[in-house]
Structures are given as C-alpha cells and as structure tokens.
Image: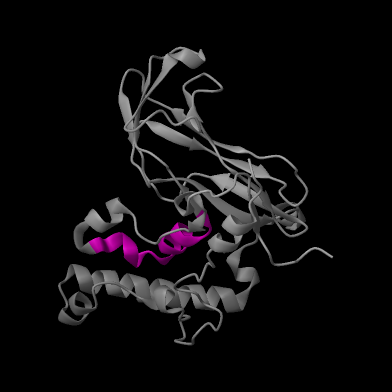
Amino acid sequence: MPDTNVLTAYALHANQPTDVFPEPAPIGRSWMDAAHLRHPYRCLPLVIANQCGWVLRNPTGFNAYWYGGSAKQDVELRFDAPEENRILSHFGNGVITFTIPFLFRTPPGVNLWVKGPANWVKDGIQALEGVVETDWLASTFTMNWKMTRVCEWVRFEKGEPFCMLVPVPRGLIEGLVPRVEPIASNPEVQEQYRKWEASRSGFLTDLGARNPEAVARGWQKDYFQGKTPDGKDFESHQTRLNVKPFAAEAARREAPEG
C-alpha cells in the first residue's frame, strides 16, 4: 500500500552532495529585502507563496548568452568552475536546461507543479513551468528557462534556486464548478465585505490626513492576523508554512551505485 503523505526523491547517483537535495523554499527574496521598510513582507499571500514547496539550488555559478537563433549552439554558457554537464542548451530556441538527479514519487493522485521559484525576479530570462504526474512516472524531468533578451548576458549564482516543486491534487481544478453571482445573493458575505470596505476606506482617509493613530498603525493587519471584519479569528489561518525537509542522510545512504 503506497504512503498517502510521503513525497520521495529517489537519488539517482551514490553519494550525491547534500547541496543538490531539494529543500523547503525560503521566505526571503532579495528584492523584498531591498524594498523600503521591507514592505512586500506585509503581503501575506506573497510570503506564503514564497514558501509553498521545495526548491533545488544551482550547483555552480554561470553566465548565459543567447545569440538569438533557434539552434542549440546559439546559447553560450560560461561556468565559474569546470563545465557542469547538468546545465546545457538542449532544446534550442534560447532555452537553458537543468537536469535533476532525482526521480520523484508523490502520493496517489498528486502531481508536481515544476516551476520557477515563486516571486524570484530574474531579468532577461523566464522560467518555463510544467505539471507532472509523479505518482506513476518512472522517468525524470528537467527544469527549463527561456531567455528573453538577445545578445545580453544573464547570470545564475551558485546556490541560487532554479526550480520549485509544488504538490497539486490531480483533478482538483476540473472538479471545481465556477460561477459568477451578484454579491447580494449571499447577504452574509455582502455584509462582511461592506464592513471591510468601510474599514479600508476609513483607514486610507485617516492615513492620507496623517491621523496619528493611522500613521502609528502603518497598515491594516486584519488579513495578516487572520481576523474577519467582525474581529473574529479564523482558526486555520496561516502566517507561515512548516514545510518538512527531505531526509537527506537516508537518501544518501540508500542511493544506488552508479
């Protein structure tokens, strides 16, 4: 009977260094750190998205240059250390491919959304995303980035996350029944919205008028604190994710020779 809550990363090579193991995605982003008073961290949906999965980190620093053509040779890679054969121009069209030395197995009915690190801004290149049925697939997948600038160097640092893995229940989106209704059709939701709207409008007015109380508050924290417009706490509200790390030592010990 397969485990219903285990995500396994089967190491394909013996004694793989631990710095290539997937790890819980970090909260921090350099552009958020650099913002005035670190304001972006007040946006809880942004902060939760940053943590919502596991990341794989780049094994070596390198620069990439796309000459604009569709051939594999039209991408030039210059590595800081000896050439890394897990990072290459494989598909052409300005795409850089990262091979991943793991075969992933998710619980039954769970896919992996293979994507770029959430809110990890990178100029001149775009992460390509895919959804993989990893509950049965017996092969690996790659992570790919599409260069968007011609004749400009793009830099990947050693240790920089290049891939994020997010579990997604298969069939969830197709099982949802979308519909649009006037908000008046749900008086309870409408009343909650009106309270929030009045509170928001009043706070912004006070802030614009430099009301000392509003200035001292700085921003409204109701959503961050999981409070409804009536001041009640929402029980299952999350302000931080507790994403478990992979058991790296066990994986190293049991990895096959090769």
Asked whether residue 60 appears in the rendered view, the answer is yes
Image point 46% across, 22% down: which residue?
94
- Range covered by the magenta-colored residues: 38-54
* Quadrant for the C terminus in the image: top right
Image point 44% across, 35% down: which residue?
126
Task: Give the dominant element type of the magenta stretch: helix, strand or loop.
Answer: helix
Q: Nearer the viewer, residue 201 or 229?
A: 229
| Residue 25 x, y percent position in the rendering | 46, 58
Q: Nearer the viewer, residue 207 or 221?
A: 221
Asked whether residue 177 appears in the rendered view, the answer is no
- Residue at the front extreme, as displayed: 257
Locate residue 207 relative to residue 191 in the image: left or right.
left
| Color encoding of the figure | one colour
- Residue at the right extreme, as displayed: 1
Disc tally is 0
* Quadrant for the N terminus in the image: bottom right
Locate residue 90 relative to residue 255 in the image: left or right.
left
Image point 38% across, 14% down: which residue?
67
Locate residue 101 relative to residue 176 in the image: left or right.
left
Q: Is residue 45 magenta?
A: yes
Q: Is residue 51 magenta?
A: yes
| Residue 236 x, y percent position in the rendering | 56, 79
Q: Nearer the viewer, residue 89 or 210?
A: 89
| Residue 185 x, y percent position in the rendering | 65, 70
Q: Quadrant of residue 84?
A: top left
Q: Nearer the viewer, residue 25 or 240?
A: 25
Residue 219 drawn above or below residue 33: below
Residue 253 drawn above or below residue 67: below
Q: Quadrant of residue 229?
A: bottom left
